[in-house]
Amino acid sequence: MRDYLRLELLTKRFGETVAVDGVSLEVGEGELLAVVGPSGCGKTTLLRLIAGLEVPDDGAIHLGGEVLFSKERHIFVPPHRRQVGMVFQNYALWPHMNVFENVAYPLKVRGLGRGEVRREVGKVLSLVRLEGLEGRHPHQLSGGEQQRAALARALVMRPRVLLLDEPLSNLDAHLREEMRFEIKRIQRETGVTIVHVTHDQSEAMAIADRMAVMRRGRLVQTGPPRELYEHPRTEFVARFIGVTNLLPCQIVEADGRKAILLPNGAAVEVRDLDGLSEGTAMLSVRPEDIVLSRDGGGAEGEIEEVVYLGNVVYYRLSGGGVDLRVQAAPGEPFQAGERIYFRIRRATAINRRLSK
């Protein structure tokens, strides 16, 4: 997949605050990239820089072979010439216009004829499944319908890239889940390149081809959702993408088999140690990669707490001098206060130097 949108050492300051700090990033044509990170990490500022709503202090932006911004070459293409669509968190629909008028507005600004406007609006309303609602005003729409109308208005101009800024945050849990699939379907049917900003890592994992994790204005790690979840490079990524146990330990090897020594000296065999050699390490162990048993295999621990959620059971386990979070199938449940044994199926090393 060739690079379609490319950011080079992009930087933006607001006074003494560095909102975006030397970000370099490539997005492939037709790719859905989710940018994730906590509030204030620079996600929205990054989108606004791409859209031309903010002027970078340094770096360059390339889109489809065109230079949209270059500090070195003194180039800045204004927003209305970038052919970039953007959907904001609050949708920004005009309350005095109905759905048809809201969606048609970008085409009328371009001077398209009435017949062409009607054809293009009809196509995009069909795409987002709003046929029959053309005459309704925003206050007459549900939250999901308002979000679809905002998507339609952004798509009707056939943008080279579509920027989504927390578009699902105002929806309830059921609608959020539904709209995740809708965004993915629309992206698949149109082939549009999407940069989707969210603080919800589960939302990003559900829809993204690739994710980019930001922290304090910097890009920390990029990759497919599975790669970030199973092979986080830093403590921050391990904690932010899902739930994990971070274990300071020693890695030892005997008879060709690797194990970890926990803080109290208990040894726990680990089947997959991500190619690590012997020595001191910080490991990320996902809750589903810890196996509990009553048969004496592994290190000993005690169940401190049990949370039953029907299809899954969560345990808080104390053992080996550490507290562990464990996720298991409901099969044969363990009880709070019960002494058990635990093994670790898989662990990933954390680069502590990068975590600082």
Image (tube, rainbow, N blue to C red):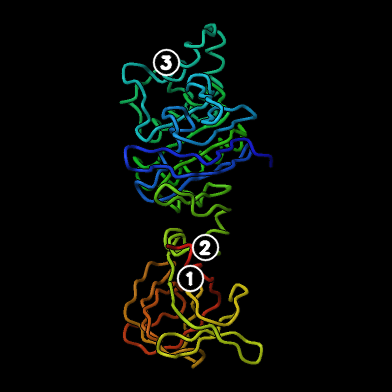
In the picture, measured across the screen, residue 133 lies left or right of residue 279, that is: left
Residue type beneath disc 3:
Glu
Q: Are marks 3 and 1 in contact (CB under 8 Å)?
A: no
Name the quadrant containing residue 333. bottom left
Measured from the top left, where is residue 66 in percent x and y? Answer: 62, 27
Q: Write down the quadrant of residue 337 in the picture.
A: bottom left
Q: In the structure shown, which secondary structural element does the residue marked by tag 3 occupy?
A: helix
Residue identifier under label 3: 101
Q: Amino acid at mark 2?
A: Pro
- Residue at image position (37%, 21%) is 136
Can you tell which mark lies on residue 232?
A: 2
> Which residue is the extreme one toward the right?
1
Q: CA distance from mark 1 to mark 2?
A: 8 Å
Closer to the N terminus: mark 1 or mark 2? 2
> Which quarter of the rendered picture does the C terminus lie within?
bottom left
> How many numbered marks does the figure carry?
3
Above/below status of 129 relative to 236: above
* Disc nearer the start of the sequence (3/2): 3
* Residue 280 drawn above or below residue 284: below
User: Does 32 sit left or right of 313 as displayed?
Assistant: right
In what quadrant of the picture does the N terminus appear?
top right
Residue at the spot 38% in from the left edge and 43% down from the top edge: 18
Q: Is residue 179 left or right of residue 29?
A: left
Decide: marks 3, 2 in contact (CB < 8 A)? no
What's the CA distance linking mark 3 and mark 1?
A: 52 Å
Frontmost of labels 3 and 2 is 2
Please tell me the numbered disc located at residue 284.
1
